[in-house]
Amino acid sequence: MITITKNYISKKSTMLLLVAVIITTLMFQQTSIAAKYNVFKGGFSSGSITVTYIDGSERLCKSAYKKWNKISSKVKLTKGNHSASRRIATSFNKIKAPTAGKLGVTHLSKGGVKVDTSSRWDTATCIQYVNSKLDTHDKRLKTCVHEIGHALSLAHPKRSVDSIMNQGVSSNNNIQGYDKSALKSKWGK
Amino acid sequence: MKKKLFGYVCVSLITIAFVFGVFTLFFKESKELEDISYHADNYVYSYEELKEYSQIIALIEVMDNLNKKNSEELVSQGYTVGCIARRQVKVLKYFKGERNYGNILTILEPASIIKNQYIHPEDYEKLEKGSKHLVFLSDDTATGELSLMSAYNRTFDIDNLNDIDEYYDLAIKSVVEYMTDLPVEQKDEVISADEIIKSNNVKNADVQTEILGAEHDMALYLEINADGKIAVQIIE
């Protein structure tokens, strides 16, 4: 009887220990994923987002947002209007940079009030400025894709890696492996 | 007599209320500012490009504080498309562009205070009144006004060089070129260096020099390695 009880306790303890180890490992994995990819703490409440354009190039807007579809099943960008509850509003290649060297910017807001990257937002305004450094379609498109990446909670990478989220001018406007993984780490596969 | 006393009391109360009101307003504005940082994409200039594309390279002193009055929000169809401020600076020394501009300049910085929110790009700190900076300015802007180039650390706070992490190489190259008395050959060696590393322990300094125009006495120690790398230590 004593032996049976001992065995039972021993099995129960082993099981508990195993569960604890699994939970700890998963937690560590999540932490390391978050640390591996530089993403904002905040973001849209859902990945189902409407894209609308304020002014500027509709072609750039369409080409840029479509690149972010079909990476994560949780992120779907569709064309819509200004009244959508979750929207990315774009102004691509229309406004000249207010300060020298600025290529693009993304402002975030909720209910018309600006919020920072750790908050929840319902509107992201993505701008690609007219800048002499962006002298080809490919370079302009890179900045547009980059800004929409910010709207989807992707930050500038903190380490040296091939990424559309790196700052600066580039003719390569393709979303890289790092960017896909970062998007999935934020939104899910 | 009573009327006079009443008058004194009234004047005193009004003065106290006024001072209290001004203090409250000032304190409220500075205390309740919400920090809103945003991400922007900037052109990454090399040191040579900074020199080439800037209209002005100068040592400046900031004359005002960032506030609601000198801030502007650029809006298109109800959406914010830019946040800037016009700041007054005094040029202490020109290194480029002296002929075309005066000693007091209005420059654009990519930060603003709007509706009790301090809005700025990530990692960008607003210019503080009284601080001295080595700046690269360009008028390649929407309004043709002078602005800091690329925002991120294209302004070097010369009294806090040790606090600079990003683009440290650009800071050191510009300080060595414009704010030291080193011979041209040694300046060229630093400017053309492949890598400049921040160090806390330069044991065998090949070059030692003062940083001119800094608020405090500051010395620059450089250890030039054979592989083109330069280790730098700044000591106050």
Image (tube, coloured by chain):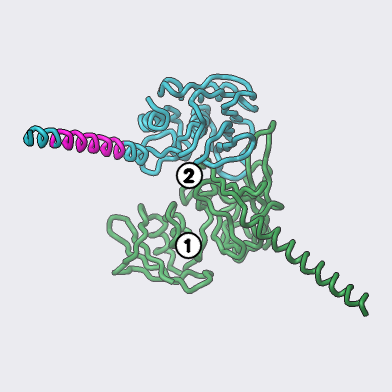
Chain colours: A cyan, B green
Q: Which residues are magenta?
A: A10-29
Residue in the picture at 61% in, 64% down? B61
Q: Amino acid at mark 1?
A: Val
- Chain of the residue on which disc 2 is drawn: B
Q: Amino acid at mark 2?
A: Val
- Chain of the residue on which disc 1 is drawn: B
- Answer above or below: position of B92 versus B35: below
Q: What is the quadrant of residue A166 in the picture?
A: top left
Residue located beneath label 2 in the image: B44
Q: What is the quadrant of residue B31 in the picture?
A: bottom right
**Considering depth in this image, is A54 or B135 the residue closer to the camera?**
A54
Task: Return the mark for residue B114.
Answer: none
Residue in the picture at 56% in, 46% down? B36
Residue located beneath label 1 in the image: B175
Question: Along the horizontal axis of the image, is B98 left or right of A6?
Answer: right
**Percent x, y for residue B109?**
61, 50
> Residue pushed farthest front?
A1
**The N terminus of chain A, quarter of image:** top left
Distance Cα–Cα, label 2 vs label 1: 19 Å
**Percent x, y for residue B106?**
68, 55
